[in-house]
Image (tube, rainbow, N blue to C red):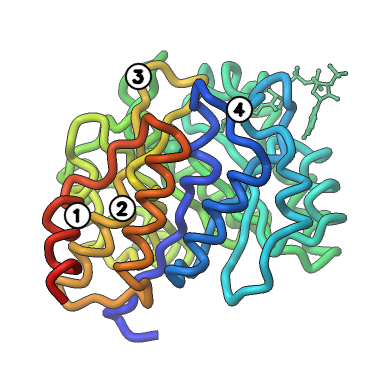
Amino acid sequence: MSNKHVTINDVGPRDGLQNQVKHLTVEQRLQLINALVNAKVPAIEVGALVSPKAVPAMAGTDGIISQLPSANCDFSALIPNRRGYDNGHTLGIPMMSLVLAASNTMNEKNIRMNTAAILDVSREVLQQAKQDKQAVQAYVATAWGCPFEGDVAADAVLQLCEELLTAGAARCVIADTIGAANPEAVFSVMTKLVSAFGADKLSCHFHDTRAMGLANVYAALQTGIRHFDSSIAGLGGCPFAPGASGNVATEDVVMMLSQMGYETGIEMPALLAAADLAIALTGTAKGGKAKYWLEQQYARS
Ligand code: COA
Ligand code: ZN
């Protein structure tokens, strides 16, 4: 892969929908996934194999996984524990994502385990995954700030990544769950992580709560990161992280990257159609900030 190639993982069908007041049906969620596949998005987080009591909007993810289209796309699902792993492995999802936070209180609120306990669970899952030859990556949430504990030390993020990568995680996704990061903080943390583990083992996930999502993507790009999460139409938010708003919008990220000479393989007109669908299905997504401009460009061509 050239140094100008960036892989986008659209987390709209999971991060984007988990916090919606209106719960979409399995058919509607599949419609959104198919629209993203149609735009040639190379990786999609399709749902979460979690307790339906904890996150009702993600109920039915098993049904989604068994109806995924056959496409050249890295489909993934979030898992909080061994049960999620076993379920995902049986269903044949290509990638699973463990979710841990760099702050203890967030782990307790999100998955009802403290950091030591979720690390134990993660090691066990990763051990099993090794035997099963199943790819599992790990989210390191609240990496630039926790809604309960405030600032998070870069060393806590580094240590958690070290544990998870050593235990066999395919990659660590460094997540700004509440959109607390700024470009300098991103540059500082990601420079440390890239020098410790290499850019190939890392990805970044930004929320646009304080309108710094795109600037944060740019800062991470400068440290060598070439793998990003984003969410169609800027959908998003975590039900257990007060104040978390949507992810940086996929269409904005793809536009910025393309204007800087990076390629993602994503087709913009079909991506804009997926954004329109996300807006129509949820009634809450706003669409990327460049939506109006992008629509003008593609209406003209
Ligand atoms: N998939 C489906 N159901 C699951 C499950 C899984 N992976 N893990 C547990 N459950 C079910 C249990 O069977 C139990 O069901 P019951 O009440 O009908 O008996 C219920 O969930 C609670 O299980 P328990 O083991 O007591 O867990 P808990 O109440 O301590 O909750 C989690 C722990 C991890 C299951 C729950 O907090 C969770 O799913 N969190 C996900 C959070 C999330 O997705 N956040 C957004 C991502 S950032
Ligand atoms: Zn998120």
| Quadrant holding the N terminus | bottom left
How far apart are the two marked residues, 1 and 4, measured between alpha carbons? 28 Å
Q: Is residue 68 above or below residue 3?
A: above
**Residue in the image at 73% along x and 54% along y:** 65
Q: Amino acid at mark 2?
A: Met
Report the amino acid beneath label 3: Gly
Q: Residue at x 41, y 68 (%)?
A: 7
Frontmost of labels 3 and 4 is 3
Secondary structure under the numbered disc 2 in the rendered image: helix
Identify whether 116 is placed above or below 298.
above
Q: Nearer the viewer, mark 1 or mark 4?
A: 1
Q: Where 41 falls versus 20 (above or below)?
A: below
Residue 213 screen position, x and y as percent: 24, 44
* Residue highlighted by disc 3: 243
Q: Which is more toward the observer, 225 or 274?
A: 274
**Count of picture labels:** 4
Q: Mark 4 — residue?
A: 115
Instruction: Find numbered disc 1 in the image and state the secondary structure of the residue it sits on.
Output: helix
Quote the CA–CA distance across marks 3 and 2. 24 Å
Seen from the viewer's position, the closer of residues 126 and 245 is 245
Q: Which residue is identified by label 2?
A: 190
**View quadrant of ligand 2:** top left
Residues under numbered marks 3 and 2 in contact, where contact means CB atoms less than 8 Å apart: no
Q: CA distance from mark 4 to mark 2?
A: 22 Å
The label on residue 219 is: 1
Which numbered disc flags the more N-terminal residue, 4 or 2?
4
Give whichever of discs 3 and 2 has the lower sequence position: 2
Q: Position of residue 153 (x, y in %)?
A: 35, 31
Residue at x 85% of width, y 64% of height: 131
Q: Where is residue 179 shown, x and y percent of the image?
A: 30, 32
Pointer 1 and pointer 4: residues touching (CB < 8 Å)? no
Q: Is residue 150 left or right of residue 115?
A: left
